[in-house]
Amino acid sequence: MVTGRSWSAERPSGRVTDADPIDAGTPSSGRDATIVPVRSELRTVRTGGTAVVVDLTGECEEFVGSEGDGLLHVFVPHATAGLAVIETGSGSDDDLLAQLDELLPRDDRWRHRHGSPGHGRDHVLPAFLPPHLSVPVLEGRLQLGTWQRICLVDPNLDNPRRQVRLSFLRG
């Protein structure tokens, strides 16, 4: 039970926008709440009808480029896709897809049986590659290692488009 000032966990629109700050205070803490602004955008990524690793790093860099210090949070609102920080262009992305095929074969063993054959394995993917990740940002620059890239991993053959939410938490 929350005591003290009243508050709502949901925004009227159900989504965070550029002008919609998040209340980071805890009503029961007895402290004054601090307003932490969040900027958030929903982007669409075309993935086609094959298993793919899509490098999102450029879009993420563009999104945080005008910001200062904080955190970039990336979220994929899908039950059959995930995110990974991985090297690309050297074969690692193809190796990842090959290993997913070995670990999670596209066959009839899956109880989840709608869509294309073996689609049930796509619903298990987020247990291995979560649909979210966060990256520190300093002076508007992602703090990734030299070879690290932010990637969408989509093995689902049934959905040619994915949405990716980019959110920046100033701090």
Image (spheres, rainbow, N blue to C red):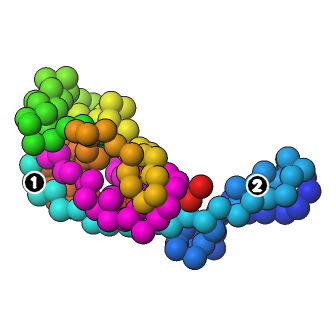
Residue picked out by circle 2: 25
Q: Tell me if residue 76 can be seen.
A: yes
Residue 109 vertical position relative to residue 74 in the rendered view, above or below = above
Asked if the residue under mark 2 is in contact with the one under mark 1, i.e. CB atoms within 8 Å, the reply is no
Which amino acid type corresponds to the residue marked 2 in the rendered image?
A: Gly
Q: Residue 35 in the image: x percent, y percent?
A: 70, 64
Q: Is residue 142 left or right of residue 97?
A: right
Q: Is residue 1 left or right of residue 98?
A: right
Residue drawn 39% across and 45% down? 143
Q: Magenta part of the protein: which range?
A: 52-81
Relative to the observer, which residue lies in front, 149 or 133?
Answer: 149
Q: Is residue 72 magenta?
A: yes
Q: Earlier in the sequence, mark 1 or mark 2?
A: 2
Residue 1 vertical position relative to residue 166 in the rendered view, above or below = above
Residue picked out by circle 1: 49
Q: Residue 113 in the image: x percent, y percent?
A: 23, 39
Give the class, few, some or many, for how many residues have Cα within 10 Å of label 2's Cα (few <14, many ≥20): some
Q: Residue 161 in the image: x percent, y percent?
A: 21, 61
Nearer to us: label 1 or label 2: 2
**Which label was assigned to residue 6?**
none
